[in-house]
Amino acid sequence: MWIRPKESLLPLALWVNEPTQLTSKYFVMQRRRGHGQSRGLSSLLVGTLDSVFDTRPAPFRILHQTPSSEVYYEIASALTEDDIKKDWEWLANNLFKVLNEMETEEEITNFTLCKIQSLVAHNSTPIDEEVSDPNSFQVVASKFRERFNMPEEERLVNYYSCNYTKNRLPRQGHLYLSLNHLCFYSYIFGKETKLVLSYTEITDIDRATNSIFIRTQNNSEYTFGLLFSPGETYNLLEQLSKMAMQKMIQDPDSPVFDHDPVLSRKLSKNVSKKSFLLRDLTTRQHSDEYRMFFRLPLTEVLDGTIKANMWTPYNKKYAAGCIYLSQNFLCFRSDVKRLVSIVIRLRNIR
């Protein structure tokens, strides 16, 4: 898809030119080294760097350059070869002949960049702009499904940089948490390490500082080390495991967790780099804790909280705490444990 033109440094160091039926001296289509069937030393090195340093550029792109210029402009990028070929065909049908009739290279470059910027302005969507960002969640989710052969319905919740210790050897890579699976991927100098676990297989999850330990039904043990966000990873893993077990108990014949269709539609409109599913699951967790503490019906969903002080007549003091609001209840909980908590039905408030 078309992106806002930007200068490209080292255009050939990490990329390889792709052959095309229709050629032009003003454009080149490239594929990222380490993506596809190439297994040379340079491809192994680029693949290792992308895996270890957490860089995820779209694997295909189109560059614009004039013969006497050393400056390249990246004008299109795509996750698949078919998508980038569609952009190349558009260039062949609409620009190749026009550019050959122009007199100066400066005129050619200015016309090309203006044309691409116009296409971006008229055709791009927030999701398109996100794909052009190598760190976007959509790029990561696409690679997740490709690497682990997951169906389109398997939604990625979040991913974390970590190392997986196997046979006392740490393997640096990424931990992927989807709705139904825990996956790990590492690529070090041509050596791929893949791990896929269903949450229904997990029997125990434990944490010690920056390490997470997992035990499965067949007594296999897995250790993951995280320098960043170990607490968030552990809490999310526990939550997803509990949801999977609840689903299996409620419907043993179909233990796969399906996301709310309303939320799935919202996913297509999500423009944040952070997974909408992660935010949704965090909200669910807060609602569960809210209902559990105040012993409310399962239909209550927490709408919001606000810090407040409550006057307590029995000791004539203010108690600092937090107000919780849902569809039918207003609740208060003090910051001091077990000091004071109240539940009020909204219909009783005048």
Image (cartoon, rainbow, N blue to C red):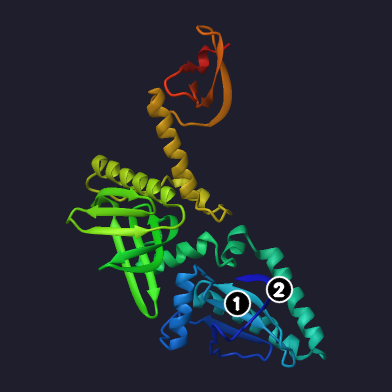
| Image quadrant containing the N terminus | bottom right
Q: Closer to the camera, 73 or 306?
A: 306
Circle 1 SS class = helix
- Of labels 1 and 2, earlier in sequence is 1
The picture places residue 122, in percent across and down from the top left corner, at 70, 64
Q: Write the residue at 57% across / 85% down.
A: 13
Residue 76 can be seen in this image: yes
Above or below, 143 against 250 in this view is below
Residue 25's image quarter?
Answer: bottom right
Q: Residues within 10 Å of mark 2 (few under 14, many from 20)?
A: some
Q: Quarter of the image containing the C terminus?
A: top right
Amino acid type at image mark 1: Asp
Q: Quadrant of residue 271?
A: bottom right
In the rendering, which numbered label is found on residue 116?
Answer: 2
Q: Which residue is mark 1?
A: 87
In the orientation shown, which residue stands out farthest toward the top? Answer: 314
Quick one: SS at disc 2? helix
Looking at the image, is 12 positioned above or below residue 283?
Answer: below
